[in-house]
Amino acid sequence: MYNGCMSIKQQAAESTNSLPPPGKASDSNGVVKIADVCGGEACIERTRIPVWILHRLRQLGATDQEILDQYPDLSARDVERAWEYVASHQVEIEQAVRRNGN
């Protein structure tokens, strides 16, 4: 997606950079933690959508398609990456659900 604030060349360089910028951690492709975004919770890259919210929706019975309908900025691959992250960070995500969700 083209961002008018950045040249296409800048966007390409940013998207291929394998190292996260300062203050940003990436444990799983497509999921990032940024200290000043969503309280540092794991989020889908390029969004402010925490993985724990997607996980909680799934616990409540939402299908992947319902999640995609609810969050049109997400792709099917984003949702797949969220589930991969949840599988490898179960304790972290469950703690985030308890801290933030119902």
Image (cartoon, rainbow, N blue to C red):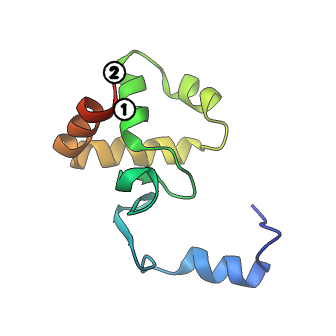
> Residue at point 41% right, 15% down?
61
57 is higher (above) or lower (below) than 100: above
Residue 92 lies in quadrant:
top left
| Camera sees residue 42 | no
Q: Amino acid at mark 1?
A: His
- Asked whether, in this view, residue 95 is left or right of residue 30, the answer is left
> Residue at point 32% right, 49% down?
85
Closer to us: 1 or 92? 92
Q: How many marks?
A: 2
Q: Position of residue 2 (x, y in %)?
A: 79, 65
- Mark 2 lies on a secondary structure that is helix
Which residue position holds label 1?
A: 55
| Camera sees residue 75 | yes
Q: Position of residue 66 (x, y in %)?
A: 56, 22
Residue 19 lies in quadrant:
bottom left
Which residue position holds label 2?
A: 59
Q: Position of residue 17 (x, y in %)?
A: 51, 81
16 is higher (above) or lower (below) than 28: below
Residue 69 lies in quadrant:
top right
The single residue placed furthest to the right in the displayed view is 4
- Mark 1 lies on a secondary structure that is helix
Label 1 neighbourhood size at 10 Å, few (<14), some (14-19), many (20+)?
Answer: some
- Asked whether, in this view, residue 98 is left or right of residue 100, the answer is left
